[in-house]
Image: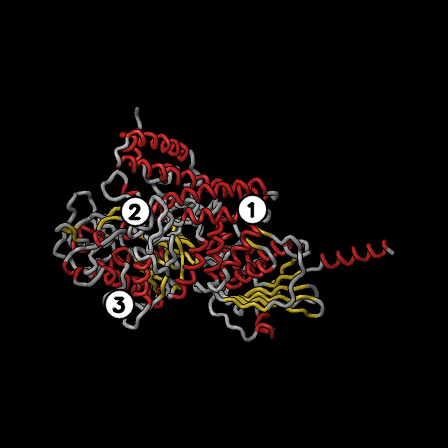
Amino acid sequence: MRLIFTVLFTLLWVSVSSADITILVNKGPFASIEQGAVAEDQTNFLDADLTDDRACTECFAATELAQFLPKAIDIKKENIKFDASMKMPATGDVFILGSRKTNPLIESLKQTKNAKLENDQSYRICSYEDNGRIITIIEGADRQGTLYGVYEYLNRLGVNFIGLGEKGMVFPTKKTALPSDLAIVENPSYFTRGFWSWYDRKPDKIFFRWMARNKLNFWTTENQPARYLKKLAFKLTAGGHDIHKNYFNPLSEYPFNHPLYQGDEDKPDDPYTVGDNYQGDANNDGMLSYYEAHKEWFGFKFGKRTTYVRDWQGSSYCISNKDAGKEFARRLVEQFVSGDWQYVDVLNFWMLDGDYKQWCACEKCKALGSHTDQIFIAANEVLKQLKQARDAGKVNHRVEISVIAYAASIEPPTKPLPDGYDLENSSITFYPICRCYAHNMGDGSCTGTNQIYVNQLKGWTQGQGRYYKGTLFIGEYYNVSSIMTMPVVYMKSMSADIPWYYNIGARDFQYMHTPTKLWGTWTVNQHLMAKLLWNVKADATKILEDYFTNYYPTTSKTTRKFYEALEFASASIKAIKHSTLDYNLRCRFLKKTSLFPSGHLQYYETHPMLNDGPDVVEIIQAVELAQRHIDQSLLDCSDPIEQQRLLEDWERFDYGKKMYYFLYHMIRLEMFHRADDIVMAKHEFKLLDNYKRQLEQIVEYVDVFCEYKDAYNGFGATQCTKQFEEYEKLYGHE
């Protein structure tokens, strides 16, 4: 009887585990679903016909489902088959993927009625039993929603894409049956979620797949695989502080047949009136430049018109000159039609970096109002010409012009926006670059920094009398250049701030300088941010509990203590490494100004009523505590994949620890220097020099965020190399 029972059980298990699953999806114009899944290079993402776009993304979604289903349920990969017939198979479990635009079966089933999908990224997941088999419908409002619905379904089965690559994936410890009672509808909280990036970052597809699997959808086009990213339903961006230099440089060649210049007759007719400042080929280089043709178009500084535009610095064009605005806009729109930005969905419309000094100072520009008023005048012309290009069929997708609210243009406008300003296709991106992370944005006790930003932000979003009533995009600085990808942890900050920004009206969110490899401790930031941006009502406490339980299964308690100590150590990161509005440490070395004038950073532990943050001694104590906890986790770890994760955490932490100690000894050296204590200053310099040498050996954990001039090694990343050299002259020799 025991033998018979064993045979029967084995046959039953084999029959269940080998039962077929059919995934129904529209292959569109492609030969097969498998081919469609990798057909991004044969897909035209720029035309008005979305048939191939949808098929490419939805076929890819089907292959992702097929790849990971065997990780969660008892089925072999060979027992999962694809079907593009759009007909319900007679037997076996069935997955129906797509939207009502692509899969007619979805419309015909009663289970898909009466649920609202609010956005192209929204999805519905429902499953039910039908004559002994499970039917699962993953319906997206469009291709984006279908892809995200697949990943959500896998998450519900216990397949989680927490970190990068295979070591970042978490699979269920026990396989389960297909659920038969799912009824899920999800709409995104933030419509845009991701990272603002530039330069040739060269992240590999592992990073991009992690983004898609976590429903993140914002990345740059610059030197990136745009078609692949479009397949993953990304919104692509370009622009920044260098658009003036790149596309309207006063020294670049004038593109028209100027009536007064000989030798340009093969160029298009000049649409602009000859100005009084025409110079001809003044420098005799055989070319007529913009500046030589229309000197009056360019910035007025120090009593004269200037050609000075270098990278992010210089002077903007003359905003009050309408012809200059038209030509600047024409050059930008040209990039969407046939140039660098054909795949761009969001243009970061920024002027040159910095304060009012980067703007034209002529009297006519001053009369236009604030710099915020002026940037809307410039953006308005771009929006008008972009609409003309769309109406003419030259641009077939929506392009959003996102005006920068930052530095000289961070205050809301003081005048009505230009007549007919296209709010439907524009936004403003608010960049609080000097915000404090020792306090949440809504914390009223941070009067020196965050409350100033809050008041500015409320000026953009609240009050019937405000002039701007469009979309708000938030640009955070979790890895602002000066942080240099140190092991900064934002569990508390993100948990509070991402819902707070949403409640004040933001619907789009990104941050600068994400690391694209070797995350280590950055993994928790990336994971938590992705979860909260998709659903601001998600329980952040539960997300973090699951993170430590699943990602560090044998050391979750001590590893969480490590992260909590590290989070405390990094709370004052902006004060110690970058700047808050009321404090910058780096600029106080070797100066006569007070070393610690703000409550945001003192040397000894102090607790003022306002602007209190972790102080220098507290930071070092927290770093030491974090070291003990991660050392214990490495000792206790009994899981080989978890061990890999911990070792990467340790490497990034070790970089940060050396940075903190370098700055600690530089602070102490400065204190002894100010006290004229040469003996102790020399002692501190020896310790400082030791950490400098250690930081010089760290390269790969620094250079992972962008091509930044100081990111060549850990010592460069201190951004105190000049100060070190001065200290060395004073105290480095016996």
Mark 1 and 2 residues: CB-CB less than 8 Å, in contact?
no
Badge nearest the viewer, 1 or 3: 1
Element carrying mark 3: loop
Q: In this view, which residue lies farthest toward the right?
A: 1
- Spatial CA distance of label 2 from label 3 is 35 Å
| Of the image marks 2 and 3, the number of the one nearer the N terminus | 3
Q: Residues within 10 Å of mark 2 (few under 14, many from 20)?
A: many
Mark 1 and 3 residues: CB-CB less than 8 Å, in contact?
no
Residue occupying the point 17% across, 49% down: 306
Viewer-nearest residue: 544 or 62: 544
Q: Residues within 10 Å of mark 3 (few under 14, many from 20)?
A: some
Amino acid under disc 2? Asn
Question: Dot 2 corresponds to which residue?
Answer: 584
| Of the image marks 1 and 2, the number of the one nearer the N terminus | 1
Up-down relation of residue 444 to residue 676 (above or below): below
| Of the image marks 1 and 3, the number of the one nearer the N terminus | 1
Q: Quadrant of residue 703?
A: top left
Where in the figure is residue 584, as x and y percent of width and height? Answer: 30, 47
Mark 2 and 3 residues: CB-CB less than 8 Å, in contact?
no
Question: Dot 3 corresponds to which residue?
Answer: 417
Question: Dot 1 corresponds to which residue?
Answer: 167
- Side (left or right) of 262 relative to 624: left
Element carrying mark 2: loop
Element carrying mark 1: helix
Amino acid under disc 3? Leu
Viewer-nearest residue: 308 or 333: 308
Give the number of the disc on residue 540: none
Residue occupying the point 37% across, 44% down: 616
Residue occupying the point 61% across, 59% down: 157
Amino acid under disc 1? Lys
Q: Quadrant of residue 58?
A: bottom right
- Spatial CA distance of label 1 from label 2 is 38 Å
